[in-house]
Image: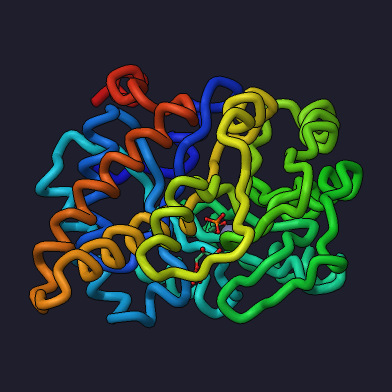
Amino acid sequence: MIVTTAQLFKHAYGKYAVGAYNINNAEQAMGLFRGCIQSQAPFIIQISKGARKYTDKKMLEAIIRAADQIFPEAIFAVHLDHGDEETCYDCIKSGFYSSVMIDASHEPYAKNVEISKRVVDAAHAKGISVEAELGMLGGVEEDVKVEDGHATLTNPAEAEDFVKKTGCDCLAAAIGTSHGAYKFKGKQSLHFDVLKEIQRRMPGFPLVMHGSSSVPQDEVKRINAAGGTLGSAVGVDVNEYLPAAKLGVTKINIDTDGRLVWTRVHREFFRDKSGEFDFRPPGKIFMEEYAKFIASRNQLLGSAGQLESLRASLGK
Ligand code: G3H
Ligand code: 13P
Ligand code: ZN
């Protein structure tokens, strides 16, 4: 059942974080739904601009509608990840998305406010909620690369002003993470001080953590043992997910870790079965492994086991 992102946030705030997982194809969708049913967790499906272009945006919508029928127990929202203004309008118009993210964080502050507010006005007119971003994460998104030294943490006073001016429903705050597999050099920890101060200024306001993959080291080792060349890849400490959730981080975005599962499964499969050329046997393994991974993440986010209580709160 597709619900609004706001309904998920209301149930989760301050208690647990909802996992927001990116999908690009049917295999990821199957693994995601299976993992969330296994762990009895609500979730958010994220679709990036790149994912919309990979096959066709209509294909992804059809996959999600089909998964909704295959897994009638599932409760989830559908979200545009890292949208530009034009893509946000396209998703708002489509009527399929529960929420959109307008990512104008690379623009100067006033311009970010101006663009985000325009998207909020258009989205709210259709009952869709909006995630905006303030502060800059390091790493690479589809067409924006932020070099290490240029990443900036969110300023809590500015965050308060930004939310007032834009009317956005949740805010992606930069608290030290970055996208991709190479997040930290040396000590790795989230900036809980920033979260605490934002929560003090805006109690009850949902925050979003991007760049939340943990880059499991055993996964990296297995990939490299099967021919990969991932360097010193390091991610977020999974034990910091729940403390962040308690401070108002209600949505935790995980994509890279799923790509690592895919890479490990396929590298190992073709290393061990070098004569194989059918994509279905490794695809089946991937769906199972991805489901296991998702269920394990939902445990760490605290969203596992929340499905029935959420259903009751929705009166369904
Ligand atoms: O933050 C970006 C997400 O991991 C989506 O990645 O733009 O390559 O689909 P993508
Ligand atoms: P990771 O690259 O850490 O998985 O982050 C994903 C993300 O933030 C999607 O918006
Ligand atoms: Zn992101």
Q: Is residue 274 visible?
A: yes
For the point 62% across and 43% down, the residue is 236
Q: Nearer the viewer, residue 298 or 251?
A: 298
Number of numbered tags placed on the structure image: 0
| 210 or 85, nearer to the observer | 210
Quadrant of residue 198 in the image? top right
Nearer the observer, 100 or 147 = 147
| Residue under the point 78% across and 42% down | 187
What is the quadrant of the C terminus in the image? top left
In the image, 31: left or right of 179? left
Q: Position of residue 94 (x, y in %)?
A: 36, 70
The quarter of the rendering in which ligand 2 is drawn is: bottom right
Q: Quadrant of residue 284?
A: bottom left
Where residue 42 appears, as percent x and y from the top left, is 35, 34
Q: Is residue 121 visible?
A: no
Q: Residue at x 17, y 54 (%)?
A: 285
Residue placed at 76% from the left, 46% from the top? 175
Q: From the top left corner, tell me how far across and down residue 308 is, in percent.
A: 28, 20
Q: Is residue 234 above or below residue 19?
A: below
